[in-house]
Amino acid sequence: MSLKFKYRIILSALAILLSATVLVSGNTKVAYADVPYETYSYNFWGDDVLQPHAYLYSKTISSKDFKKALSYPQDMFYFEDALYIADTNNSRILKLSLEGQVLMEITCADGAEDLLNKPQGVFVNTDGNIYVADTDNSRIVEYSPEGRFLRKIGRPESDLITDTQEYKPTKVVVDKAGRIYAIAYGINMGLVEFNHNGEFQGFMGAAKVSIRAFDYIWKNYFSTKEQRARMQTFVPTEYSSIFVDNENFIFATISNLSEEDYMEGADTVRRLNPTGTDILRRLGNYPIIGDLYSTADSNWSVFSDIYATDYGCYFILDSAGGKIFAYDYDGNNLFCFGKTGSREGTVQNPSALTLSDNHDKIFVLDSIQGNILTFDITEYGKHLLMAMKTNYIGDSETATREWQEVLKANANYELAYIGLGKAYLKNGEYKKAMDYFKLGNSRKYYTKAFYYYRKMVMEENFGKIMTFIIITAVLILIFVWIKRIRRWVGEVRCSMSKH
Amino acid sequence: MQYVKTLKYVFHVIFRPFDGFWDLKREHRGSLPAAWTFVVLTIITLTVEKQNTGFLFNFNRLENVNVVVDIVTVLLLYILWCVANWCLTSLMDGEGKLRDIMIATGYALFPIVLIRLPLVFFSHLITASEGSFYYMFGMISYLWAGILLLLGTMVTHQYTFKKTLLTCICTMIGMGIILFIGLLFFSVIQQMITFAETIYKEVRFR
């Protein structure tokens, strides 16, 4: 074998190796670049920091394959491996399998003549009973799991609602006690509440009207009649969607906000307890308003649907940006992904979102395209949600492990550092905890860790510190005394020399 | 050794300002180099503070900390104050010369160095709940310097207290005016340069 030949073999082997690596790396890159959106979250400084995808787009259930395509569907609910969809403009409720087969279709209420009219909301309770907000018929209809009509709850009869006032229920939820809550178009006194018999109970969780003194004075004393007519009236905000969580608290989103509201970080999400008080925790660095800035190509987030997990995390759908924002129990932004557009994996006007029971699938309903987009959780997302979950139930050991996994994939994740810092704080490794809280930019926890660390150092070195203080004090005293004595000696000498 | 002596005199000035400022001017106990030293020390203090304050009290983003900004702010404010004060007091029959004003102002800055520099060290030893002390001392340093500035002006120009207050307010307005005129001048010059440049280009390419 000649040397030249050997050389050639080595060269060709090298070439193959090189091309193989290029191919492999190229392949992975393509797979990643295929995702039409970015996943990011906001850090302590308010910068949007890219992070690994928590959910990846997997497939679209297109309604073009149905007998009748979806037309402007407004709500979607996941229950036992099936999706319930309020197909608003077709005036029907659909039950779909996750593969996109129509399992059931509901078009009428009490008898074949009593048709649904543009229903905008659908809800399924734990027994499988289906509740429909039959919007244009001003009623809520309940069906059995098989789709049999059970009852209808009409317009609430109360002095609180005048006869001329509009009442159009758009969203409905039922809590475990059977209480029915509905958002109704035309009612701005909060959620409409019915008891389990369908009797009107009152309004709940009215959004407070807040008027700034300046606005009030400007409007009432300095504006002309024409100007006043063009100004917005100070009315309470209406809710855009509701979700009842496993603790029977109601998550509600608010969408009609002004530029100033966003700038001031007004409420966009509330968690209402049964008395209607907002108990949502807002301990994050920034208010829960979705994107923190609006730019030329991205507007303020408009929240149109919400889904809450049973461990305090919640997902909010931003219909303006086509994004999904995830927040933790404390109101920290976990991640955000999604995009509007016409590419596969993007949405045009999303109206509803729901998650599968184990939260490894997100379904987004696109009202314009009539599609349902499915997003699958990634390993990273699994670790992240598991960390949140175990942290919530108090299993800090698993949480620590999960946070470490999260950090492996995303070394820029402040929440993971804080999570690990908490674990070290609990274990008494104060110095380490301090380092992690510093990385996580959490001064609130840093000061706690630092307090214990300082105490520990003080106790360990008490002897040294006290010796140091005493010695310095003695030295200073001696110095002062020497000075005094010298001065005194000087004075004595002086007086002696005078005499 | 004269320089060191004038440096040391600052402790007399900040604790006994009436006597101290009087002697600065009339007994020549202070010097311009010493005053400038204090200005430089102030700049150093602010920079060190931004970079080395403990995590709990440091809300500066380290990658955005810029020494030049500190230098420019302190120097600019110092020079502006001195010039505006001098312009004004020479009209309002103040007795101080520009040199006296510069010395008095420089010496008046010293409490900032004296308090805030040790604070940087102590910020590493205290928790957030003890932070009120930190913020209080920080406030005191500025208040002290402010009062010294006021008294310095008063003693240097032999004013009554009321007149001093008025002068100080007017000085600040004067600083604003100088800044405004400076910016105006800057932008006019810039436009003139662009104008000349355009003409040159037009002529050249013709």
Image (tube, rainbow, N blue to C red):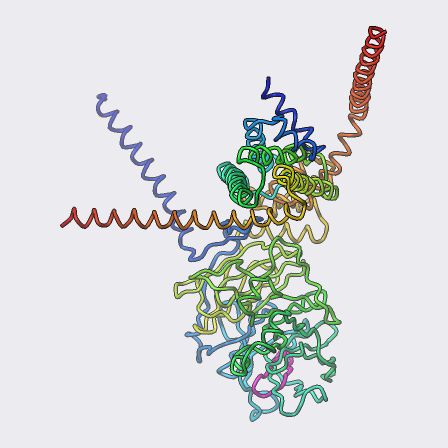
What segment carries the magenta color?
A131-147
Q: Quadrant of the rendered structure where residue A244 is?
A: bottom right
Q: Name the residue rendered at 39%, 66% in the picture.
A: A342
Quarter in which the C terminus of chain A is drawn: top right
Q: Give the percent coordinates (x, y) of residue A401.
A: 64, 43
Say which of A469 and A387 sits in front.
A469
Closer to the camera in the image, A151 or A65: A151
Q: Is residue A27 left or right of residue B33?
A: left
Q: Position of residue A273 (x, y in %)?
A: 73, 68
Q: Is A207 located above or below residue B39 in the figure?
A: below
The residue located at (61%, 31%) in the rendering is B25
Residue B49 lies within the magenta run: no
| A361 or A43, nearer to the observer | A43
Residue A74 visible in the picture? yes
Could you tell me which quadrant the N terminus of chain A lies in? top left
Determine the residue positioned at 58% across, 71% down.
A77
> Please, is residue A128 above or below residue B6 in the view?
below
- Magenta stretch: residue A137 in it? yes
Q: Which picture quadrant has residue B97?
A: top right
* Residue B43, horizontal then vertical, whole percent: 55, 34
Q: How many marks?
A: 0
Kindly tell me whether residue A437 is visible in this rendering. no
Q: Is residue A20 left or right of residue B143?
A: left
Q: Residue A477: where, in percent of width, then height?
A: 82, 19
Q: Nearer the viewer, residue A141 or B118?
A: B118
In the image, what residue occupies the spot 66% across and 88% down? Answer: A155
Q: Residue furthest left?
A: B206
- Residue A126 relative to residue A366: left or right: right
